[in-house]
Structures are given as C-alpha cells and as structure tokens.
Amino acid sequence: MSTQLANSIDAGGYNFAYLDEQTKRMIRRGLLKAVAIPGYQVPFGGREMPLPYGWGTGGMQVTATVIGQDDTLKVIDQGADDTTNAVSIRRFFARTAGVKTTELTTEASVIQTRHRIPETPLQAGQILVYQVPIPDPLRFIEPREVETRTMHALQEYGVMHVKLYEDIARHGHIATTYAYPVKVNDHYVMDPSPIPKFDNPKMDDSPALQLFGAGREKRIYAVPPFTRVRSLDFEDHPFEIQRWDESCEFCGATESFLDEVITNDQGGRIYVCSDTDYCRQRQHTTPKKQEAYP
Amino acid sequence: MTTTAQTMTAVALDGLCDGFADSTHQAQQVFRRVLAAMAEPGTVHSLEPGNAPAPLSSAAYQICLALLDQETPLWLQPELASAAVVNSLRFHCGCGIAHRLDKAAFALITANGDCSLAAFNQGTFEYPDRSATVIVEVRGLDAERGENCGEERSELVLEGPGIRQQRRVRIDGFDAGWMQRLADNHALFPCGVDLILTCGNQLMALPRTTRATLIGQEH
C-alpha cells in the first residue's frame, strides 16, 4: 500500500495529475459515454481546479483524466505554445503528473487546446482536448436546460438555422466567424468551442479523437475519429472559411490562420500565423520573406 | 474479538483475487485502451496479462477494476457470479451488486447466455448517457480476416463513427441472435447500451452507434 501511494503521489503531495482517483473514474465513465454518443453533452461532477473558471478547468479535468506517464503533452492557446494560459497548464501537468511536454504537434500524444486546431494534420492515436466555455450552442437562444435537452433529443434545430438566417438578413452573409455550430454524425448539433470557423473542416473525418470539457458548465462531449462533422449552412449560402490576401510575415504561409498585429501608430500592421509551431516548422524548411519588418 | 474478526474475514473474502498493484497508473492504462476501443469500434486492444477470479477473463476483471466504484451497481449473469468474482469486485471496487438488470450501470454477461440487451437500462432521450455498459465475455476476438473460420466464428462488417468506411472483425460466439440484438440496440439511438467484448486479456468495443452486418448478408 505504501509503495502504491509513493508511486502515485509526487513530492508536492498531490495525486498523479492532481485529480483524485474517484473523480477520474467518474470522468472516465462520462468520457466513454460521450464517445459512444458523438456530440451529446454528458453532465459530470466538475471539480474545482486551482485556477479560475474560464482558464480551461474543463479541458484540464479531461486531460488529467486521460493522461498517463507515457504521454507527451502539448498545450496551445489561440494556436500559440508560449502564451500565459498554455504555459501555466503545461507547467501544471509537468509538475503534478511529471509527463513529458512538447511544442511539436507531431510529437504530442495529448494536445490540450484553447480556440484553435493545429494546422499540422493530426494523426491516428492523438487526442485533442478542447477547453469549452458554453457547451450548448442552443443556450444563447433558449436559456432553459430542460428545453434545450428536449430540443437535442428531438433534433429540433430550426432555431439554429434561424440564427444563421438572421445573419444573412442583416449582413448578406453568415457573419458567425467562431464557435460556428456543427452537426455531428447527422444527429447532435454541437458547439465546436470558440475555434475560428476556419478550423471547422479539420474536425470532419479526423483520424484523432476529439474530447471537449466545459468546467463551469460541467459538461463533457466527444467526437470519435472518422466521424462526420458538418457545419450548418444553407444551399444558397454554403459554409465558407476565412481567406486572407496577406501571407505570414515570418514564414510566408498563405493557407494558415493569420493574426493581425499592429506594429506602430502609423497604421502599420503585419500578419503572422496563429499556430506558432506550424510557423516555426515552416521557417526551418522554407526561405524567409525578403523584406524583414523593422 | 480477534478470532471473530479473522473468521469473518475468511468467510467474506472467499476466493479473493489481487487487485491492481499500482491502481493509479494501471487504471489509467486500462482506461486508455477502453477509450481507444470505444473510439474505434472493432479494433482489438490487449491489456497486460493479470490474474482474474474464475470464471472471469483478465480483460473483463481489469475493466471492472478501472471503472467501477460505489456509484456503479453491477449486474452479473448467474454463470459469472461466483463467490470469487463477487468478493473480488466488492472488495476492490466497492460496487454494489444489482439484483435487477435495469438498475445496473455495468453488466457482465457471456455471449452464450440468452440475456436480452433490451432488459438493461437504455437511457432516456434526454439523458442517453445513463444507459448501461455491458461487458460481454466471448470465445475469441480477431480484427483481421482469417482463412479458416468455423461456422460459429462469425465475420462481421462494421460501419459507423470511429470507422473509416468499413471494418471487418471476427467474433467467436456471436450468432444470428446476437446480430439481431446489435441491430435492435443500434436502432434505439441515441438510447441503447454500449458493449465491451472481452476474451483473455483482449478487448473490443461495439458502441450503440456501430452498425454490424454478417458477411454475405450486407444490405
């Protein structure tokens, strides 16, 4: 018994990956049901984590539950490995679970993400864990949980199309650009978390397992590999992703999701890849753009 | 006092089998294989070999150790409910033994039993996640297509989420009756039970989303 405890509890006095075993079992059972019912939100007994709601407590609980000693963890926030949220969460698991961490998408077995899917295509066997603020796409239209549950059960998704239609009526096109609702396996309408709609096509038929955790709302859901994920649209207003006329200032990428960066108060601006690992890999393999920014 | 306690222990723990030596990491490793199996139905995953109370397979026992606790009533098919199995699971998992099929969160059955899947908790349309998970002991599992398959060794074609186009598997012990049970269970979506098939230290999952047809009887 004492060896067992010694093995699983590190010097900090916490259980392996912070959560206690009973909580992990509860979340594990929830995850299995979530995978068996793609896109359906499974309620779970969310625990308080040592950081506030909105910082990825749901994703962290899912990661803490799936991760093992042999895993390699990558954490990204808006595509970047070096932002506050990503650094803190990566350190948290390095400290509480002692797992290897990486910034390379191809090297990671578990990737926890806030608001992006890596540009590098995911591989079979990888697990992508999303941090989710509001898991139910119907919540903004119908605040009552009892109602939205019935709507999901009956596939009563007309209001979701009305919401997109209102965009067209107002702006002439679907103006929703992130958290763009998707239909999973032709049944449940699901919130893909606040990823840009640019990333929606990557969810469809992905070889990786996608898990979603919402800490404050206490919901888990999942998309198994090779599952149909379709963005809602209309025949005459088909789903489209963002395109840029510019290319990345550092690597010259034209096909990746670009962030706009203001460089001075004269209106100067550059565009850079939001996925830092993808950008770095490209900088190694492709020649840099000629005009470097001052 | 001491004598009484010892006698009680001896009676209550008849046939007790070892649990995990390192519960944290072994439970995680077993879970990850079950998760991978559930995410890609029809793939066969091997667990570390280990002891199990007769007549349970090592895989079924390890899945129970990893997932069951005081919140999950377990239903056991009478053929599997030996004193060793009941005592080991109650001791290590602390799970209650359900006496009614529809009260169980998990169930352990054998493929040759005549247990109807419809008798288990199917979940509701609002909460389909509340349905049972049924662990089925089968005589053989094979993810690859072999040459000599006997009459009873049915070859199945699987389709659904987690499967790129189609996957072929052979499950020893699944007869026409089982094909009907799988079809009926699939038709209940989003309700229905999820199956984990076990044999020796191997496992395969057939969640409710998987459509299964016998070779030669497709469409």
Image (cartoon, coloured by chain):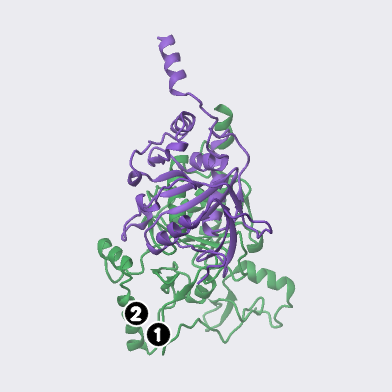
The chain assigned the colour purple in the figure is B
Element type where label 1 sits in the image:
loop
**Marks 2/1: CA distance?**
8 Å
x then y, percent, for residue A164? 36, 81
Which residue is rendered at x = 43% and y = 47% of the image?
B114
Q: Nearer the viewer, residue A182 or B35?
A: B35
Q: Does the residue at mark 2 contact the one at mark 1 (Cβ under 8 Å)?
A: yes
Residue A204 in the figure: left or right of residue A149: right
* Image position of B102 with respect to A138: above or below: above
Residue that carries the numbered disc 1 in the rendered image: A234
For the point 47% across and 18% down, which residue is it?
B10
**Which chain is green in the picture?**
A
Which chain does tag 1 point to? A
Q: Give the labeled residue for mark 2.
A: A161
* Left or right, A182 with reference to A128: left
Label 2 secondary element: helix
- Dot label at residue A210: none
Q: Position of residue B153 (x, y in %)?
A: 59, 54
Q: Is residue A9 visible?
A: no
In the rendered image, residues at marks 2 and 1 fall on the same chain: yes
Task: Please report whichever mark, 2 or 1, sits nearer to the chain's N-terminal start.
Answer: 2
The kind of residue tagged 2 is: His
Q: Residues within 10 Å of mark 2 (few under 14, many from 20)?
A: some
Q: Position of residue A25 (x, y in %)?
A: 46, 44
Q: Chain of mark 2?
A: A
Is A89 located above or below residue A20 in the figure? below
Give the image location of residue B40, x and y in percent: 55, 60
Query: Which amino acid, mark 1?
Result: Phe
Quadrant where the N terminus of chain B is found in the figure = top left
